[in-house]
Image: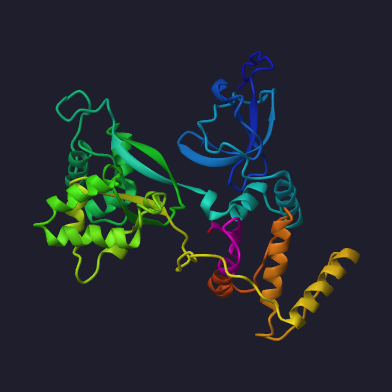
Amino acid sequence: MAVQQLDFDNSTFFAEVVLPVPIPKLFTYRVPAVINDKVKKGQRVIVQFGSRKILTGVIVNLHHSPPRDYEAKYLLELLDEAEVIYPQQFSLYQWIADYYMCTLGEVFNAALPSGLKLSSESTVQLNPSFSADDPNSYQGDFSEKEQLLINHLRTETLSYSSIAHLLGAKNIYSLLKSLAAKGVILLLEQVKEKFKPKTEKHIRISSAYVDKKKLEKLFGELAGKPKQESVVLKYLQDVPVFTHPELNKKGMAKSSLINETISESSLNTLIKNNILEEFEVIVPRFGFADPEHDHPLLLSEKQEQVRNDILSCFEKQGIALLHGVTGSGKTEIYIDLIRKALEGGSQVLYLLPEIALTTQIVQRLKKYLDRRWAFIIRSFQTMNV
């Protein structure tokens, strides 16, 4: 079947997209005009693949030439403001595909970090054109399970797993296929992010009470409520809002306020009365708190000599190998070199041979360095700490 060729001007962009499928080609999609000035190589996009599938791909190239053999579908959504895959990575992935005789899509599926991947979960809803009260919408009978599902779909959209639980059956595909063929249901694809950041509930005092006179009035109102009064006193002891008002914005962890003498119900009452505010903050998954201040790093005479030898070596060949047994003080030398590089405006990549060392090393780095750094663990997940 011949495809009608349309005329496109230079304001029409087409994107070559790599998709996570074992097909040795790129797929061309038309860029909506409203995102012409936003689209770039290396960004993730949502596209329709085939008649029913929704996939996430990465833009490899942009041009003005439409495909000759088919009419290009539009990109459905642009997921990133900037590129997430860089030219060096594209070159590496292409080399891997050539060397191991696989498709570029398979390499992308394996190489893309889990935090950047999207999963597609099918969902089911009633077809708007179907009405159980209208005899003309469908001629025929429904099984007991079909009728049960239809009744639930009248009020909500359900996922495959929810339907399987509702019907008490593992294999629901034949039932869904039957209802879809009857025009009763529609199968949709819901795109979800896999990565979910770890959050922690924090508490802070309402800005209306960050005033001594208003706070005195508050304590007068809480005089007959000792449990609620103890919550506010505990917060003010841990967060000195009058001497350091900027600390109130960060607040403190909700779990830190609750102890043997302070109940969660008293805390929730203060939140309900808008005396305290509850909010969530994204926290690192490493299980330790921030240090109160940086500690000075003092090297021994031997460590200073080794550090100076390394710096001299860098001036000659840019590579140095430091050999030492466990506990000999190598880490302190590394930290001192890292700090000097950061202070000079450079960047440092610190790699560990074992993921089990992560928490220990991060604790030591946080002790001696400020927060202008990121730690990359062996599984290639970036964590800002």
Q: Is 289 displayed left or right of 104 in the figure?
A: left
Image location (x, y in percent) of residue 32:
55, 23
Is residue 31 shown above or below 210? above
Is residue 383 shown above or below 16? below
Q: Is residue 89 a member of the stretch shown in magenta?
A: no
Q: Residue lying at the far front in this picture: please name it.
A: 213
**Residue at 67% of width from left, 49% of height from top?**
103
Image location (x, y in percent) of residue 34:
54, 22
Q: Is 64 displayed left or right of 293 in the figure?
A: right
Q: Is 310 displayed left or right of 229 in the figure?
A: right
Asked whether residue 275 appears in the rendered view, the answer is no
Q: Is 369 displayed left or right of 63 in the figure?
A: left
Is residue 26 shown above or below 331? above
Q: Which residues are magenta?
A: 365-384
Asked whether residue 138 appears in the rendered view, the answer is yes
Image location (x, y in percent) of residue 223:
12, 56
**Residue at 69% of width from left, 17% of height from top?**
10
Along the viewing direction, whichever of 274 and 93 lies nearer the viewer? 274
Instruction: Tell me the quarter of the picture where residue 180 sits.
Output: top left
Along the viewing direction, whichever of 375 and 189 lies nearer the viewer? 375
Image location (x, y in percent) of residue 155:
20, 37
Location of the N terminus by quadrant is top right
